[in-house]
Amino acid sequence: MNQVGETTARALLRRLAVEQAECRVPSLTAAIVRDGELAWFGGRGRVGGLPPTAETQYRLGSITKSLVAAVVLRLRDEGRLDLLDPLAKHLPGTPFGDVTLAQLLSHTAGLSAEPPTDWWERTPGLPTADLLARLEPGHRKHRPGRRYHYSNTGFALLGEVVARLRGVPWLRAVQEEVLGPLGMTGTTERPRAPHATGYAVHPFADVLLPEPEHDAEAMAPAGQLWSTSLDLARWAAFIAGDTGGVLAPETVAEMREPATVNDGDAWTSGYGLGLQLARHAGRRLAGHTGSMPGFLATVWADPADRIGVLFMANTTSGLSDGLLTDLLAILDEHEPRLPDEWRPAAADPDLLALTGLWHWGPTPYVLRLLPERGLSLTPASGKGRTSRFVPQDDGTWLGLDGYYAGETLRVGADHLDLNTFIFTRTPYDPSAPVPGGVEEWQA
């Protein structure tokens, strides 16, 4: 069982209760996911006169984008598209045919944040053909790839790419390829009972103002879906690596890689491929926020700890910025994760012989054997280029990360050849294929 203890549950519920009361939220739910399972759920406020449950629906808003992105990555893994493909290859006729699918997924295509329609979140949507007809060159706001610029329009285009490649509406593709396999049966296009009603809270009185809800049609891939805490908990587990066969874990890890940052060099927030990213208190979080009239939602996952956290609320604005990180901090304080037990592992004698000290010129590096036949190459000082490598069928090794990501390591009789850089057992070994040298001292 992964349920939190009674003391932890009380502390988590108190934090949720403070949020609901002080921020004047009509109803609010939150959940913790641990090792792929729902570990804690809490609800405050009222929906139809009753406390909300883990099966009460709220609108997801832009969390919808991550689900669409998962189908795009499935298409990529099937070979139906390449992320470097220009949009025109799969959706001809737009003024942005040169932007790539990867740029659309990471909000670096430079497109307008909002579509050329009425306020799309608050008015009935347009058919896709009508939206495409309204797009003009002026809706490109930045050079593709130059910077992060969030674009709802971009995900409307990705939804149409999915529809054209699958031959079915984008929603059906998401239902059949993501929601169904993950068991997310409480996620739907429009609300179903029990569901919360979207409200804004009057700024100067404890009065509720009903918010509109429409079918966004062409813009639906940017924020249409409704879901439950149970389903969003399953999605948090997916982001953390429990992919249920929908995508390979390596593909979800690729979605979590920073494609762009939103706040400068020492970044704390950024974007991957359909996933928002954040760094907080030593954690690297991936997930997405969601906002539609009358609703707010957020889901974060930390794959390193296999932990997820989420909230759903029926209010247009007003929640604090720290609810979810506070819930994570409470969990860390009361029930910190224990490190996995160290256990010895069998080692291939030939690989074991490769371990130890190697030199890049005068600089010592340490080669270590990792589980599952992996290797790591790290400067002995701890500072510099560090990469991990995995074996390939042809006897070479492929770099996974760092400076040498994607590069090839070849093992020679007395040296390592890492993309032309030669590593030897002693500094400047004169017998190496590209020898260095030490100048002889003369009196």
Image (spheres, grey):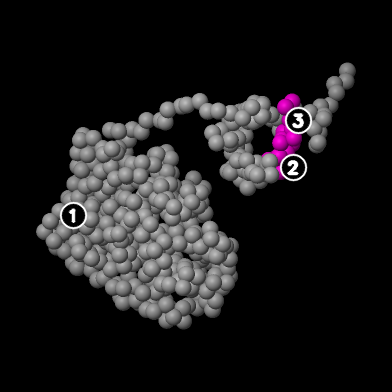
State the residue position of label 3: 414
Magenta stretch encompasses residue 418: yes
* Direction from residue 98 to residue 276 in the image, left or right: left
State the residue position of label 1: 52
Magenta stretch encompasses residue 155: no
Element at label 3: loop
Q: CA gap, disc 1 to disc 3?
A: 67 Å
State the residue position of label 2: 420
Q: Quadrant of residue 408?
A: top right
- The image shows residue 105 at horizontal and vertical percentages of 48, 61
Which numbered dot is residue 199?
none
- What predominant SS class does the magenta segment belong to? strand
Quadrant that contains the N terminus: top left
Q: Are marks 1 and 3 in contact (CB under 8 Å)?
A: no
- Identify the residue at image location x=84%, y=26%: 439
Q: Are marks 1 and 2 in contact (CB under 8 Å)?
A: no
Residue type pointed to by label 2: Thr
Dot 1 or dot 3, earlier in sequence: 1
